[in-house]
Image (cartoon, rainbow, N blue to C red):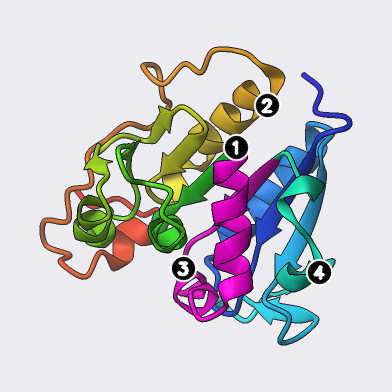
Amino acid sequence: MSLHGTKIALLIEDEYQILEGWYPLLRLQEAGADVRVIGSGTKNSYHSKENYPMEVDAAAADVSASDFDAVVVPGGFAPDNMRLHPEMIGLVRDMNEAGKLVTAICHGGWVLVSAGVLKGKNATGYLPIKDDVENAGGTWVDEAVVVDGNVITSRTPVDLPDFTRAIIAHLEGRPTDTEHATHNRATDLTGDPAGTRYETGASVS
């Protein structure tokens, strides 16, 4: 397993989901990738919903799709903030149009919606964005990780191991085993309509 020489953009903004920001960053670095944290340009450090900071390497306006092989969009409330910045949406759109790997987890799918990435694609995410995915022309699939060409999406923090394995497999040119995901339960929000427990990875049973 080696992603040496692979360059990945991790988009970040305030109120990102802490695991969805740090797990891919550390896991992809461990695999050898050069992961650059890309912010909106409004500050040099952004805070998670728990106020944990992540420093940025560059602003979206100062990089381009040609600088990277893949982009990762974490969830939380950060994607809502990212959508206010055309440079961030443009980076994702340009990477998709170049056929590069575009990935998102949880609410991160909102950025893919705004970038026009999901039309004609199978995709997943945090259950409340299902309507947004379908209205953007995507087909909703309730699985831990969904791979459709150059687009990889996952649902919530409990799916992070499968999400990052799929990213690494794609970048290494290996087939992605989505049939044996370690955690493939449905997004059942019975008794928790707001989805708070599910989003944080706790059991919803």
As drawn, the label of residue 171 is 2
Q: If the image is split into quadrants, where does the N terminus sit?
A: top right
Report x, y in % for residue 193: 15, 66
Q: Which residue is mark 1?
A: 101
Is disc 1 in contact with disc 3, using a CB cutoff of under 8 Å? no
Q: Earlier in the sequence, mark 1 or mark 4?
A: 4
- Which amino acid does the dot numbered 3 rest on? Gly
Query: Which residue position holds label 3?
Result: 76
SS of the residue under disc 4:
helix
Amino acid type at circle 2 is: Leu
Q: Earlier in the sequence, mark 4 or mark 2?
A: 4
Mark 3 or 2, nearer chain start: 3
- What residue sits 59% from the left and 80% below the top? 14
The image shows residue 144, relative to residue 170, as above or below, that is below
The answer to which of marks 1 and 3 sits earlier in the sequence is 3
Q: In the rendered structure, are the residues bearing label 4 and label 2 in contact, judged by CB atoms less than 8 Å apart?
A: no
First in sequence: mark 3 vs mark 4: 4
Label 3 vs label 4: CA separation? 24 Å
- Circles 1 and 2: CB distance less than 8 Å? yes
Mark 1: secondary structure? strand
Disc 1 residue crowd, few under 14, some 14–19, many 20+, Cα 10 Å: many
The segment highlighted magenta reads 70-98
Is 79 left or right of 67, judged from the image as shown? left
Front-lying residue, 115 or 11: 115
What residue is rendered at 73% in x and 65% in y? 38
- The picture quadrant where one finds residue 21 is bottom right
Q: Is residue 15 magenta?
A: no
Find residue 88 and report its image quarter: bottom right
Is 5 left or right of 87, judged from the image as shown?
right
User: Neighbour class for label 4 at 10 Å: few (<14), some, many (≥20)?
Assistant: few
